[in-house]
Each structure stands twice: as structure tokens, then as C-alpha cells.
Image (cartoon, helix red, strand yellow):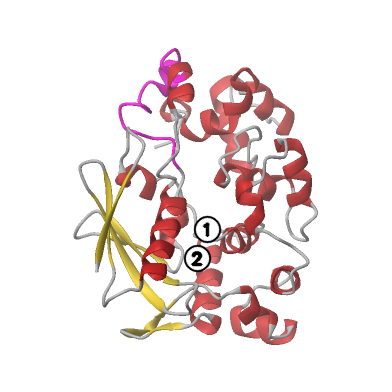
Amino acid sequence: MRLTQSAHPPFSLSAVVRSHGWIRLAPFREDERTGGLTYVGRLQSGRVVELLVQETSDGVSVEVQGPLSEAETEDVGRQVAWMLALDQDSSAFYALARQEPKLAHVEEQAKGRILRSPTLFEDTVKTILTTNTSWGGTIRMVEALVSRFGPPLPADPTRHAFPAPDQLAATDVDTLRAETRLGYRAPYVLELARQVAGGALDLEGLKTSNVPTPELRQQLLAIKGVGDYAAANLLMLLGRYDFIPVDSWARKMVSQEWYDGQPVGRAEVEAAFERWGAWKGLAYWLWDWSASGET
């Protein structure tokens, strides 16, 4: 089955796919043949399907093997629209970016959307698994979590969807740690899964929450395993750009760009983009660091 969806212009699927490293985390894959992406996901009906997403003249097409019911088709549409932020209007940010040479490229290249998972639960788990580890470690942990606990794709049982909260909630911390080598993160992931599965935490409701960003940040910080960096990263994925996900890379880039390589902290990183206000996280994300040694 094939369906099409339009995107708020300008749009570039390639820009979304390459917006950050999520495309390298299971169950995402970049489709090198088409330049699109594939994602193995579970629909609300319980079916596990692979989505092949490719760019069209005004948005994307989505191919799924086999027929879908009307409800399943709507579910696929919602998932893809969220993953790719198809309705995001970046015109206000572009208007500001035109005045900054370091951001002059973003509108022409249709940058501004950040690839995200269909659920905030998946993105929260993945974000927790980026903390205090190498990127290779994150890839390995996510792959282990998906392959060990995620439901298999019927057409290719070697591939799996991301495990739902109830699937992870049914295990125990020792099994989770042994099967996935999550280390100290295992209790955080398990508690999060149990809170979401039991209804104590409505993560998905945060996607449409109207509360001010500082309040939303506090709700994220209340999740065990989510600190300042992780909360800022999740806010970015939610389309809130008021905070910068400050890590060692951010400090290094800001140091080289404005402080002649001298050590800087969170305050200096935040101050460097303060003038961008509610857009400062996105300005940081898309900044041209090439003169600062970034290749």
C-alpha cells in the first residue's frame, strides 16, 4: 500500500534524515537506494510493519507491504507526520536566520526539522542511552534493546520494532541489564517503561502540551535518568528550542568559535545564543561551525 503526505514548505527529506544521528539507531535505517528512510514500527492495531518513506514534489510517499485498514492507514499517516515534523512552519526562524551568515544556508537547504521517533517514549529511552557513553555505545545499546525485546517484523524476523512500554515493563532489571548491557541506565529505562505502561506518566500527552517550556522542562527533568542535557534534547525533539543540549561537543565548539580555545561551561554556551530567544536551541543546532574546526 502507498500513501502520500504533503509537508509545509520548504521541505527536504534528506535534511531531516541527516538532522542528527537518530537515523543510525534501530529501528530506523537510511534507504541508500532512494535517499529516504525505513522504519519498523508497531501500529495501534498491534501489527508490525516496515515503512519506506521517500520524498515527493510536495512531501513524502509511504509504502507499506500488504493492505492496511482505514484505521491503520490513519495511524501510519500520524506516525510519519510526527517523525518528520511535516506540519512544522519554520518561517519565523528563517526570517531571523537570513540576517546571520552562519545560518544563511538553512532556508535554502530546508533545514530546521529534526528526525524523531513516533513516540516520545522511544525518544526518551534513546536519549537516556546517549548519556555518559560513546556514540558507538548508544548504537549498540539501542540495537540490543530492540532486537531482544522488540516485536519482530513478520516479513523479516531479523528486524524488530522498538519495544512498547508494556513489553519492557514485563521484564526485570537484572534481565534487562544482562540482555542489553545498559549498565546503570537499566533501572531508569525499566522504571520509565513501568510508569508509562501503568498510566502514571503520560509521555505522549507532552507532545501536544501547551504548558510553557520551562514547566515542560521540569516535567522532563522529573524522569529518572533525564538531566539537563537530556531534557534539552527532548525539548528540541518536541519542537521547543528555548534550551541548548549542552555537552562536551557544544562546549568545544563554542570555545573555538568565541573563546580562542579556552575552556567554557554551560553559561558561556547559553550566552552565545541568548539573542536567539525561543529559537536558540535550533540556532545552535544548525550553526555553521566549519571555521571552528568542525568538518
Give percent across and percent down for residue 179: 61, 84
Q: Secondary structure at mark 1?
A: helix
Residue range highlighted in magenta: 97-113
Q: Residue 247 falls in which quadrant of the image?
A: top right
| 209 over 47 or under it: above or below | above
Side of 266 relative to 208 (left or right):
right
Which one is in front, 217 or 60? 60
Which one is in front, 205 or 236? 205
Specify the label residue 203 is tagged with: none
Specify the label residue 135 is tagged with: 1
- Location of mark 2 (residue): 139
Give percent across and percent down for residue 174: 73, 85
Q: Residue at x 43, y 64 (%)?
A: 75
Q: Secondary structure at mark 2?
A: helix
Question: Cβ–Cβ below 8 Å for labels 2 and 1?
Answer: yes
* Amino acid at circle 2: Ile
Give percent across and percent down for residue 196: 70, 68
Give percent across and percent down for residue 73: 36, 66
Quadrant where the C terminus sits is top left
Q: Residue at x 28, y 50 (%)?
A: 60
Q: Is residue 102 magenta?
A: yes
For marks 2 and 1, give the CA distance.
6 Å
Pointer 2 local density, CA inside 10 Å: few below 14, some 14–19, many at least 20? some
